[in-house]
Amino acid sequence: MTPAATMTSPGNAATGGYPIKTVVVLVQENRSFDHILGWMKSLNPAIDGVDGTESNPISVADPDSARVPFGDHSEYVDPDPGHSFQAIFEQLYGIPFAPGTPSTPATPPTMNGFAQEAEREAKGMSGTVMSGFRPEAVPVYRELVGEFAVCDRWFASVPASTQPNRLYVHSGTSHGATSNDTKKLVEGFPQKTIFESLDEAGFSFGIYYQYPPSTLFYSAQVRGYIELIIYELAPTLHRNLRKLKYWGKFHQFDLDFKRHCREGKLPNYVVVEQRYFDLKILPGNDDHPSHDVSEGQKLVKEVYEALRSSPQWNEILFVITYDEHGGFYDHVPSPATGVPSPDDVVGPEPFNFKFDRLGVRVPAILVSPWIEKGTVIHEPSGPYPTSQYEHSSIPATVKKIFNLEKFLTRRDAWAGTFETVLTRKTPRTDCPLTLPEPKKLRKTGAAREDANLTEFQEVLVQMGAVLNGDHRKEGLYPQKLVEDMTVGEAAKYLQEAFGTFCEACENCRKAGMDESEIVVVNGAAGDGSSPEAKKKSFLQKMFSCLVCNQSGQTIE
């Protein structure tokens, strides 16, 4: 296959002319297709969902094992099932992962280890993972599936957790990450993103966040980041969403999204980021267990209705998917043959994963007035015989719609593209103006702000420490920072960290620094407990602007 650095569209033919000028992407958290949309098959038999005959054994090795049938009783889901690389291996292949085991076995996935692995996590959890939502429990999705398109062959890019899969959404690779790798996030990922490809071609993008945007964290692409901060600025730095030129691309969702929709000012590529922390006043709406899925339904409804009322509606394609399956059952085997490594980077020990198979199937809904009602998309027809829909399909489709010059990696060059869903010659005029109002699924109690952090929430806090400079405090970063931290404390810390970074950006702008410069907050050394350090001025304590230029100059 052609090296990624020179990979272009087949024949390098112009592929413009699509009616879409704005692609909107919302990636929710940790749910499988069968868990969220499987029972939609009862409304449309063309959907490859569930019919109640599916089950998993409690013990795969025991031929007489009791089996757990797949049910329809999911509502408020707590606790959070296993979704590490090794947990997913057992879910797909029915055997626990052991050191020395090939990370991609020669035999295809059997999808029969979900109940077994769940019981290993916690007794009784098998009933949680072997269940899905009735269509009426997710009324916003029920309406969208009936009105627009559902894809029943969209897979997570990696059989792993959140961070690696979200990296594929924006860059077509996780650059070897198979877990939520704090060290790599701090050091920086070197791969190019779809944001930069769009910017280079003269197209606009915008990130609408409700909490400090994880997109910012996942685009930390500075080579030698630790050494750079402690000693001196390296003369060559990779592209970074923390450059001053990109700072205006970040918008507060609650303040700006509806206004930009109403005024027809949405950029060409829009990413909506959700609330990742579950608070009493602002409940989590990312769908990550144990967050109430009705809050996620409200978010999708809010985004759709703002888009639908926009003068840009006839030029919009809205994509809703989930980063990974979160440990919940799905009956469709994950593709494990013909999947190319994006960049030949091999994952760390003990898995040594070659990124040659996909993760579990996840929900995917496509919304546009150019889509016929009730459309169901199965496997793609190309560009290669083994191509599948997965998260790299997003940058691949964006490349095609906007006729960008190059693919990001071999993976998005291989992934199926979904512009083929735009089959109409004229936009529909009967698209609903509003969607159903979701009903609260958490029947009792409120958000537990005193709850422990999930693994992904820990990573978000640790990335907040990179933004405000706390990662330099000896003995604090990474693990002590999140040790015993509650959800409420984490949300407050992250907001304040992001505020520090925002103020640093503003000061750099006022100082007249070039837009190609990268803002790095230089926190106080030590463990942060020194009274003397606390007396320092904001500028001395919290940041210096490190300049990304050929001279390697450091500005403080």
Image (cartoon, helix red, strand yellow):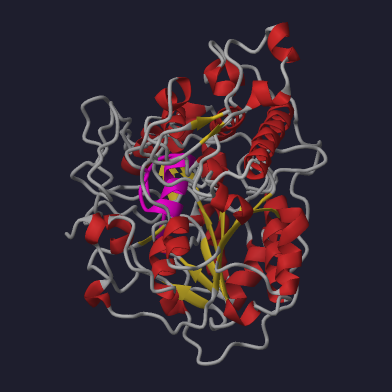
State whether residue 311 appears in this view: yes
Q: Is residue 337 left or right of residue 81?
A: left
Question: Viewer-proximal residue, 439 or 307?
Answer: 307
Could you tell me how many numbered marks the image carries?
A: 0
Question: Viewer-proximal residue, 246 or 324?
Answer: 246
- Which image quadrant: the C terminus? top right
Which quarter of the figure has residue 460? top right
Which quarter of the figure has residue 283? top right
Question: Viewer-proximal residue, 399 or 281?
Answer: 399
State whether residue 58 appears in this view: no
Indicate the position of residue 109 as horizontal and vertical percent values: 29, 47
Please give the name of the residue rendered at 29% of the width and 62% of the height, measured from the top-left corner: 413
- Which image quadrant: the N terminus? bottom left
Please give the name of the residue rendered at 52% of the width and 78% of the height, measured from the top-left corner: 20
Residue 156 colored magenta? yes
Q: Is residue 363 left or right of residue 359?
A: right
Please give the name of the residue rendered at 68% of the width and 9% of the height, measured from the top-left corner: 529
Indicate the position of residue 136 as horizontal and vertical percent values: 69, 63
Specify the segment rendered in magenta: 153-174
Q: Is residue 224 left or right of residue 463?
A: left
Please give the name of the residue rendered at 18% of the width and 60% of the height, measured from the top-left corner: 2
Indicate the position of residue 213 as horizontal and vertical percent values: 61, 45
Residue lying farthest to the bottom in this orientation: 425
In the picture shown, does residue 87 fall above or below 219? above
Which quarter of the figure has residue 398? bottom left
Residue 82 colored magenta? no
Question: Viewer-proximal residue, 87 or 177?
Answer: 177
In the picture shown, does residue 87 fall above or below 340? above
Indicate the position of residue 364 as horizontal and vertical percent values: 51, 62
